[in-house]
Amino acid sequence: MRIPKEENGVLSLLEKYPTADGRGIKIAILDTGCDLAASGLQKTSDGKPKYLDFIDCTGDGDVDMNKTIKLNSTKSIEGLSGRNLTLGDWAADAEEVRLGAVRLFHLLPGSVKRRLKRERKEAFVKSHDELISKKQQELDSLRTQKESDDEGTKEEIKDLELMIEKLNSIMQSYEDSGPLMDVVMYDDKGVWKTVIDIAATGDIANAIPVAPFGHSRQTGELGFGSAVTFCVQVYEGGKILSIVTDAGSHGTHVAGIAAAYFAEDGNGEEEENGNKESLSGVAPGAQILACKIGDGRLGSAETGTGLVRALIAAKKYECDLINLSYGEPAWQFDSGRVSQTFSDAVYKWGMTVFTSAGNDGPALSSLGSPGSLSAPITVGAYVSKDMMIDQYSTLPPAEEEAPLEGSPYYFTSRGPTPDGILPDLCAPGGAISPIPRHSLQGKAQYHGTSMASPNACGVAACVLSALKIEGINKCSPTVLKRGLVNSAIPVAISDPFGEGAGLISALRATEYILANYGKDGEKVPIDISIPSRNNARGIYVRDALELDGPMTFGVLVKPRFDHANERTSDEMNELLSLELDLHLKPSEPWVVCPERMTLLSATERNGQSFAIRLQTQDLPPGAHFATVDAVFPSDDERGPIFQVPIAVIVPHSKFLSDGNLSYFEINDHETIEIKDNGIDFSTTYKLLPGAPNRRFLTVPESAEWATIKVRSSANSPSYTSPHNILLHAIPFVRGDLPNTEIQIKRVVRLNEGIERTFHVRVKGGSTLELCLQLLWLANPSVASVIVDIEFHSLNIRAPTFASSQPISISAASEFARLGAGASLRSEELNPSASLSSVERTIRPQKYDISSGSLERDVLPPSDAEVKAAQSNGKILDGRQIFDMILSYEFKVEGEKAISVTPSVPSLFRQLYDSPLDSQLWVLEDSNSRVLEYGSSMHQASSVSLCKGDYIVKLHIRHPDRDFLEKMKDLPCQIKFDLPEPLTCNAYADLDKASTPAITTDDRKPLGLSVLRKGSHQDIYIARPTADLPAWVTPGDAITGSLVLDKKIKAATSMKLVYAVPPKSSKKSSDDAKPAEDEDDLEDVVFDAKVKFLKKLRTKKSDAYTKLADELKKEK
């Protein structure tokens, strides 16, 4: 088994429809880009080119081609690299060419760049060592000669010694920026042709000009052993050349899963071991539009620019399906410009989007974006028994244990989101698929939800092919999604939070759509929300306090109509005719809802409402899931036309605190007990392969962190040990903090007799989930674990725990004051405080707003608007996206290099939910040399900068020019790392902290002490007494951390900020001005003249000579 097709029902579908393999379907793969020369990705099963096109949507391969020159008769020109370029016969008819230049390393995926750097350095070191060795031998030979005392020999020895010293210096200062390649572009009868000096020699006489890929399907290969395939695109009338390469192997692997085709006569690999299983992808007949959204400048991270441009391109190429196997933490859901564009792609442009759920499970509420968005189909990762054996060579369970069963992968991200949404379905999440040639292997085995999403997308392509055979040529995203979800099959080890409706099934989905196509309401998308819970998309009750509160919730149901502004008669009829008689069916007895409702378009009332009541009193501890399904009473097999998801968490601790019990049996094998102190717990786990095991504990109100101790319940090894388990703890869900900001995830090897300890911050009153899962990939045998949970507090944080408010020492104060108290137990207090970096906020010196690219940055109108315009004989334009560049200037002072990191804190960590289409900054020196790039999501690496002037250029985008105009004063933060941390002493006494400069009274900082339960300790954090660096200025903030217990830094640290006060002004008691001040003034004047002299150098030669002579006389 290479690419699973039995689990997803594709093989069954092909038995009924042999040509329903994705033929006639176009899939846009939004990823790192693809290797156009990879095996299995050349042709479709019916002989069409596999790739429609390959587009770099990020702009990281853009080359400025504004430089134009007229050709002379010799066809020899000087390139931008400074090399003399020898043109070939291909330039015979060209009168003018455009010139550009690009470094090879700028175009390479990170792994290839690292490989080439290593190989080139090894080659350099080898040749350099040989040269040094040769010169050393010559030197040794001269030194042993009898004539070594004569002057000529001495000079020769001296020269060789100097040469060896220089060669050693070159070795130590070795740096490889990569070959600089010239680029020549010319117009060949209306088609732009490009020639790249691949060898970086200047000889391009025999080079083959390359046209844009969509024109003639030409590709090339970058040199120096990179094996990286490229193609080109041309924009803005030849001003911009896009050299398109992949940013990593991920995209090719994903494309292979969705649609690879290994021809029977081409590779001889069509059948595997004589079985029916094919090496091809799920939909080998589908064509691919490769859209690179992974920006090579950012280590292949996605950007808003890449995502929005890719969706525009997918619509331009009339793609049916889109796959996005990318994702980031989620802050807000269905919010922001990128999120809105995905919604438009589905509901207005008619394309079905598949996306991966993410790989941050197994704990609940670990779903990120775009998996948490409503518009895409979110896919979790499933693994079958056969996949476990074939792809992972998993050991069989012990004889007395149950056999392996299919289940969600342990890592697949789980719902519910804070507002109640789960993944839609699951698909096989592992595959052996083609990867780029530059990886130096043909295929690779990857697993993740990144592999599940293209598998599901391939299934959809096969379903659409089958529907075309049956005469349904256009299936809307709503109809397709409803068919896939309502026909999904529950898996053996059920986990709705990870699998959604169940395992995708190609044949069942096809049969469902055929049976229900054209029925009332089938093509109408329906949104549901819970107004009383901030318009949540489901009901999610997680904390114990909520269980004691109101359990009746209003549900707002609103059909979605994406009509033209001026509705057509068909659209008006759709509004007027919608009248669906529905039964409301709860899936569990603890959910109560009305029996039925009549759903109308309800545009006048903005939707229709009904209520749901939850009866949770008798629910056992753990996670519970239910739905309210709206079904047709006379057509029950049709399934729900809409569904309200409901998740209720009943904490295990509730049964110990509410019932005055100290011990509770969860089942025959697992227990939980509360310790004698009434706040700590001990619980046992029996871990089975494929099944996450969860405990939910209500955190004491004043608790600030929990200590988790994990050990095997066995005292001695067994023949099935050792085991690896995954510990995943999420302390709370409410609020806008994604789980990645607050959780802990650790792989624990269970060694009998050894206890592992971990710490996680918690929030009082919230529910802590402690999820353990057996890592079955190597050893699926059952494991038994004991976990102790201790809660701690020093009562020092604000109740909102993750508050962004730091501990602050103001500019006018000498200290910060706080207090610690031991409310739960006796605690150790061992504080330390230090400042490690300077944060400087700057405003832009200038800004510039311009229209984006006409080819790449115009949002298309909706299908409804286009149809309405066509009926009136009109052609609609799209909506232009605008670019704004904000320029921030700053200086680095001091004699030593400083590590610097720019950022835009107000927009940081926002991508899918960002109010802007995109954010990207570039750091340049005074010579416009690029030093670093940074994005909206991932913290950039610090850059070591020497004294000088620098500029940060922030690129943001939005379709509303006025919106950008109002962002013109957006602040930027420059972080300077201090060479050495500045210590801030912690004192127990106010008088010590308020006079930090006094050091003569034998004062001692607050050290290790024990706070007895119920006691209190005042803590005063004094400002640093060491001198601040001279370049630190008033208005800067010096930041670091306060740690309350040095042994538990991760759980007891807080941000510490010192606002820099005005600098000291030291005055002499003598009114007379010191003589040295006069000298200082002369030096200042002299320096000013020298500075002015530099400006005159290229302007007025006479003035320059005159001032230079004056300065010579002064000195």
Image (cartoon, rainbow, N blue to C red):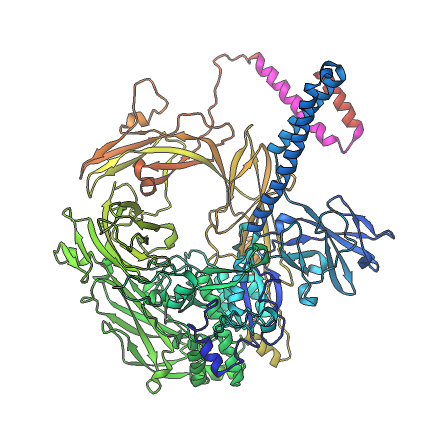
Q: Residue furthest right?
A: 73
Answer with left or right where residue 95 lies relative to residue 805: right
Answer with left or right where residue 337 lies relative to residue 669: right
- Does residue 551 sit above or below 902 in this rendering? below
Taking depth in this image into account, of 629 and 488 the one nearest to the observer is 488
Quarter of the figure that contains the C terminus: top right
Q: Is residue 569 visible?
A: no
Q: Residue furthest left?
A: 660
Q: Give how far across and how far down residue 443 sits, in percent.
A: 53, 61
Answer with left or right where residue 721 lies relative to residue 32: left
Q: Residue at x 71, y 56 (%)?
A: 239
- Does residue 882 sit above or below 77 in this rendering? below
Taking depth in this image into account, of 262 and 1098 the one nearest to the observer is 262
Q: Quadrant of residue 421?
A: bottom left
Magenta region, residue range: 1075-1101
Taking depth in this image into account, of 530 and 90 the one nearest to the observer is 90
Q: Quadrant of residue 820?
A: top left
Answer with left or right where residue 786 lies relative to residue 609: left
Q: Is residue 896 visible?
A: yes
Q: Give how far across and how far down residue 499 sits, in percent.
A: 37, 67
Q: Is residue 652 magenta?
A: no
- Does residue 1054 sit above or below 135 in this rendering? below
Q: Give how far across and how far down residue 687 sits, in percent.
A: 27, 59
Q: Main secondary structure of the magenta part?
A: helix
Q: Give how far across and how far down residue 788 sits, in percent.
A: 22, 49
Q: Is residue 1079 magenta?
A: yes
Number of on-image labels:
0
